[in-house]
Amino acid sequence: MKKNKWWLLLVFAGVFTLFTSCTDYQKIMKSGDTDAIFAEAMRLYENGSYAKTLQLFDKIAVFVKGTDKEEPLNYYYAQCYYQTGEYTLASYYFKKYIRQYPFTERAEECAYLSALCKYYQSPVYSLDQTPTNEAIKEMQSFINNYPLSPKIEECNGYIDELWAKLEEKDFRIAMMYFKMEEYKAAIVCFKNILKDYPNTSHKEIILCNIVKAGYEYARNSVPLKQRERFKEMVENYQKFISTFPDSQYIKEIEHYYKIAVAFV
């Protein structure tokens, strides 16, 4: 019975505290006292009540213009959206802060967090990569604007990760064309990957598939075009074996080469 009484007392205390807290919040909200509302907003922010913080900030935003509270209000307004994972809105308000206060101590942090918001919005490689390109652009912009920032190394890491995602998408597209036997399109895509991502981890299989696709493309061409296309395939084969002389794929594509040289 005593345990039940203690449990009931704890529940009552919790409900009473919640009710009192809500009542105090409403009183402050309606008070019209800018200082009290700002102080309560900051208290709620520190406690992780970001939605209520935003409500209070909205209440006094007009009245703090031109005061010493305007700058921190705009900073914490953006932070509230960032802390709740509303990255589109957070990025918008961080950029707004930078435009309004470009020379404050917080400007660099806001520029970094805005770029980080873009990074978090980058989707998996199979989806449209427009947000990924935007994230790379903003990360690079931060690096250019704050070259001495301690966040530079971190940003470079994010950029490498984002580029890897773009590379993976392009590689999957090239492989899709290859499997669909769209050999000309596959060759173009594979070569673009080598140009856009010179350090790609897929380089060996890409060069191999360029040879395979080149053979099939030449084999299925009209006789007038075959010699020219087999010649290009032979050149790609030679490039492959010079780049990867010990490759596991050499035996696999060697017979393609032997057939092709007969046409050259």
Image (cartoon, rainbow, N blue to C red):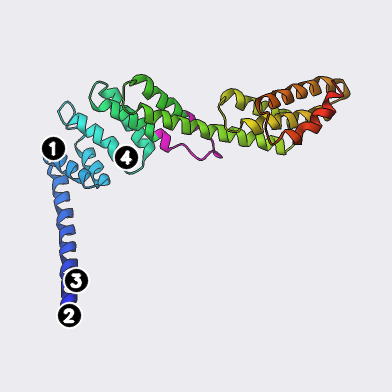
On the image, the x and y values in percent for residue 41 come to: 19, 42
For residue 85, which quarter of the picture? top left
Mark 4 or mark 2, earlier in chain? 2
Circle 2: residue type: Met
- How many numbered circles does the render carry? 4
User: Circle 1: is it few (<14), some (14-19), or many (20+) Cα within 10 Å?
Assistant: some
Q: Residues within 10 Å of mark 2 (few under 14, many from 20)?
A: few
Residue 129 can be seen in this image: no
Label 3: which residue? 7
Asked whether disc 3 touches disc 1, contact meaning CB atoms under 8 Å apart, the reply is no
Q: Residue 35's x, y, as percent?
A: 11, 38
Spatial CA distance of label 2 from label 3 is 10 Å
Tell me whether the residue at label 4 lies in contact with that at label 1, contact meaning CB atoms closer than 8 angstroms: no
Magenta residues span 118-133
Q: Quadrant of residue 73?
A: top left
* Spatial separation of the CA atoms under disc 4 and disc 1: 22 Å
Q: Which residue is mark 4?
A: 81
Distance Cα–Cα, label 3 vs label 4: 37 Å
N-term-proximal mark, 4 vs 1? 1
Asked which secondary structure carries label 2, the reply is loop
User: Label 2, on which residue?
Assistant: 1
Q: Which mark is residue 34?
A: 1
Horizontal side of residue 193 vs 129, given as left or right: right
